[in-house]
């Protein structure tokens, strides 16, 4: 009986010590979170709320961007299609000329690698996709609600395929207004909705094509860091059909101004596309004021 009582007493003591250690760890994490959030949401500058930014459909600039912020992105990806592989690359520069206004220039490229049994003329051609220019205005930023809302517009001047490049040089244009709404729940959990229509104009065929995008994301940001794990769901409606791709992802900070984002893509409907992967290298030079 004494042995049992000693065992129970020892177990309770160990449990109490473990509980105290866990409480200490939680307190330390809360302090780290508070310090990092305070660094981003500097009360001496204009109000800005920390939000996790999705990695595939990324934002033009941080919501609530402050004047002088800037960022370079280099993206590379691979998509396994039913008849060919698609290799993607992009280079992107974004900056904030004034508070809450973000601008972006991006040049994406696609290389098509057909499978051996496929003839080159039966699959799409490689191409420099377009010259993308974009603007984003955060018109609502609430530190109390931990929420931000922004309006934006992307214009894509589409180039011809490489096998007929220059004849003509530009084949069309895409008009893409969008709305973004984001909220942070507590210190660690982040949600975001990105939505808007895409209207594509083909100059040669004199045709128009309308689609509608709805992208949602959920992220958990690791305490006291810029690292996160999460998932992005990309939906596109066109011609009475919907294409949905689920993209699990993670972002890791290598240094104070350099981050790496890695994500996969799993299509819900596999009519044309199978698994994909994408990596984004993010460099943030010091802000210019």
Image (spheres, rainbow, N blue to C red):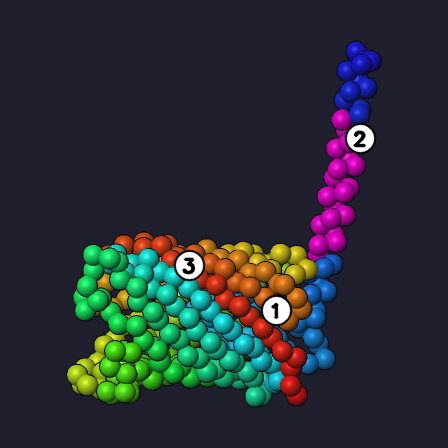
Few, some or many C-alpha atoms within 10 Å of disc 3 (few <14, some 14-19, many ≥20)? some
Closer to the chain start, of discs 2 and 3, is 2
Mark 1 falls on what kind of element?
strand
Q: Is residue 27 magenta?
A: yes
Secondary structure under tag 3 reads strand
Give residue 216's quadrant in the image.
Answer: bottom left
Instruction: Give the residue at mark 1.
Output: 258
Q: Main secondary structure of the magenta part?
A: helix
Give whichever of 40, 104 is nearer the camera: 104
Alpha-carbon neighbours of circle 1 within 10 Å: few (<14), some, or many (≥20)?
A: some
Quadrant of the rendered image containing residue 180: bottom left
Q: Which residues make up the magenta segment?
A: 11-30
Mark seen at residue 277: 3
Res 210 visible:
yes
Q: Position of residue 217 (x, y in %)?
A: 46, 61
Q: Residue at x 31, y 61 (%)?
A: 85
Q: Is residue 179 left or right of residue 126?
A: right
Q: Is residue 130 above or below residue 231?
A: below
The residues bearing labels 2 and 3 have C-alpha atoms spaced at a distance of 49 Å
The one of 255 and 209 positioned closer to us in this rendering? 255
Residue drawn at the location 48% of the way across and 77% of the way down? 92
For residue 169, the mark is: none
Q: In the picture, residue 264 is in which quadrant?
A: bottom left
Q: Is residue 235 magenta?
A: no
Q: Position of residue 129 (x, y in %)?
A: 34, 77
Which residue is rendered at x = 59% and y = 66% of the image?
259
In the image, 210 versus 88, the foreground residue is 88
Cα distance, mark 1 to mark 3? 20 Å
Q: Return the residue at label 2.
A: 13
Q: Could you give the CA–CA distance between mark 2 and mark 1, rounded to whole angstroms?
A: 45 Å
Residue 64 position in % (x across, y down): 57, 78
């Amino acid at each position: 009986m004494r042995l049992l009582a000693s065992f129970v007493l020892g177990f309770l003591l160990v449990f109490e010590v473990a509980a105290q250690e866990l409480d200490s760890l939680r307190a330390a994490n809360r302090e780290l979170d508070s310090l990092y959030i305070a660094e981003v949401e500097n009360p001496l500058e204009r109000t800005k709320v920390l939000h996790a930014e999705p990695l595939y459909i990324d934002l033009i600039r941080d919501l609530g961007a402050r004047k002088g912020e800037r960022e370079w992105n280099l993206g590379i990806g691979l998509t396994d299609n039913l008849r060919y592989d698609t290799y993607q690359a992009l280079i992107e520069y974004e900056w904030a000329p004034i508070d809450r206004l973000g601008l972006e220039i991006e040049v994406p490229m696609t290389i098509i690698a057909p499978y051996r049994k496929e003839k080159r003329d039966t699959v799409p051609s490689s191409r420099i996709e377009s010259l993308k220019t974009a603007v984003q205005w955060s018109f609502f930023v609430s530190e109390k609600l931990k929420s931000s809302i922004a309006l934006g517009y992307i214009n894509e001047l589409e180039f011809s395929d490489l096998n007929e490049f220059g004849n003509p040089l530009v084949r069309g244009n895409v008009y893409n207004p969008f709305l973004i709404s984001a909220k942070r729940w507590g210190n660690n959990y982040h949600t975001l909705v990105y939505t808007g229509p895409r209207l594509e104009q083909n100059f040669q065929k004199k045709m128009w094509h309308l689609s509608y995008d709805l992208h949602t994301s959920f992220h958990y940001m690791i305490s006291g860091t810029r690292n996160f794990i999460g998932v992005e769901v990309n939906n596109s409606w066109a011609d009475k059909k919907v294409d949905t791709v689920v993209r699990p992802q993670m972002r890791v900070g290598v240094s104070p101004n350099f981050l790496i984002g890695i994500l996969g893509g799993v299509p819900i409907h596999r009519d044309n596309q199978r698994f994909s992967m994408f990596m984004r290298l993010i460099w943030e030079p010091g802000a210019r004021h």
